[in-house]
Image (cartoon, grey):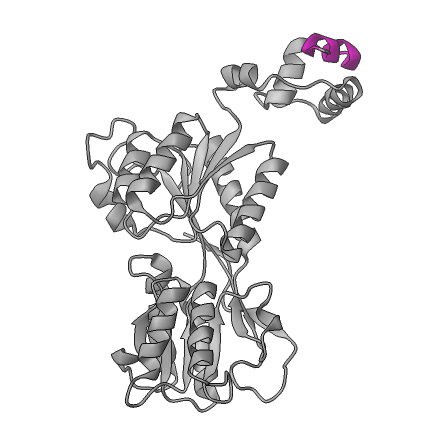
Amino acid sequence: MPTMADVARSAGVSVATVSHVLNGTRPVLSHTRRAVLDAVDALGYTPNTLARSLVTSRTRSIGLAVSAISNPYFTEILQGVEAAALEAGYSLLIADPHDDPGHERKVVQLLHERRVDGVIVAPSAHPDDLVGYLRRHAVPTVFLDRVIDAGVMSGIATKGGADTAHGEDAPWYDQVCAESAGPTARLVRHLAGLGHRRIGLVAGQPGFSTTGERVAGYRDGLTAAGLAHDERLLVSGNSEATGAEQATAALLGLPDPPTALVTANNAMTIGALRTLRRQGLSVADDVALCCFDDFAWADLFSPRLTAIAQPSRELGAQAVQVLLDRLDEPHRPTRTVRLPCAFVHRTSCGCPEEPGTSEGPESTASST
């Protein structure tokens, strides 16, 4: 089995230079780096990851904790995380917290105990214990998809003990998410433009930032269209299909039911469709439907689903990049990166013919 010394002899450099190239511990001239990497390939040298972690104090591994991994949205995020981590030379450890606050804290603690360099987490609706643990142990963290309000953070930062690793106001977490409010308002304005005056929202689980932002966008859309706010038209589907079935049934059971619906994620779209079918109602003809979250088979429904498409894989890749930036520069300013979504115009909204195009993003990516 070839050794680092063999690589050094083949490349005509010192063992220390080979170590710097493979571990990224010091800048190396590009032609020297190329010679070392060519020698590694030619000899079939495999670095000792345990030894490398002792030199660099890094394991070159990332922990990912996202719930509902079977959900197509999170599956695509996972693919983005995995591809970006692999490209950067990092391995990935994955856990599913099942959106349970107690379990969430346990699985992230297990990832941390495996000595991952940092974690990417889609937090539950009540992440107090998780956040307290991450801060107390100074774990480099990126919150993904569901962001956490800074005021909430500061209020629970030292819960359970003093924070010995950071000052109270020290930056320690970054966030990556998609825009939610603007795209939701776009769906409402679109339906209003088609003549609908009673537009219902099947909202997500209370406590998620995505739920709050989409509810705010729904209300903004009503205001922009000059429509009254009827709180009976806003019902939680709890971010899952069964809850959405019940929420849709409640909306349709109103004395003056909505003529159009917006569902706030892909799972709830399935639930709404089940209820509409059970009640013998035709999508578009009887009840117009738009959904937040495009997914692989959205164009297979009849009529095809008008939707907001999130940049799922890009979200995952961006989360990895933000985490790597944090690892390289621990004291850099914190960031919240918001990526734009696209309005995918099909026919479930009641438009008479297939537009055949995706309109541009609702907003532009930003960092704050």
Q: Is residue 143 left or right of residue 305?
A: left
Q: Taking the image as drawn, is residue 336 in sight?
A: no
Residue at image x 75%, y 19%?
A: 44
The x and y percentages for residue 74 are 50, 52
User: Main structural element of the magenta stretch: helix, strand or loop?
Assistant: helix
The x and y percentages for residue 146 are 39, 53
Q: Is residue 119 above or below residue 294?
A: above
Which quarter of the picture shows residue 304? bottom right
Residue at image x 57%, y 69%?
A: 298
Q: Taking the image as drawn, is residue 309 in sight?
A: yes
Q: Is residue 48 left or right of residue 284?
A: right
Residue at image x 31%, y 73%?
A: 235
Q: Is residue 167 above or below residue 242?
A: above
Front one among 173 and 264 = 264
Q: Is residue 98 left or right of residue 288?
A: left
Residue at image x 35%, y 32%?
A: 109
The x and y percentages for residue 297 are 59, 66
Q: Is residue 318 above or below residue 42?
A: below
Which quarter of the picture shows residue 278? bottom left
Please provide the residue range marked out in magenta. Answer: 3-12
Indicate whether residue 6 is drawn in magenta. Answer: yes
Q: Is residue 174 above or below residue 344?
A: above
Front one among 258 and 342 = 258
- Image quadrant holding the N terminus, namely top right
Indicate whether residue 66 is drawn in magenta. Answer: no
Q: How many marks?
A: 0
The x and y percentages for residue 261 are 41, 79
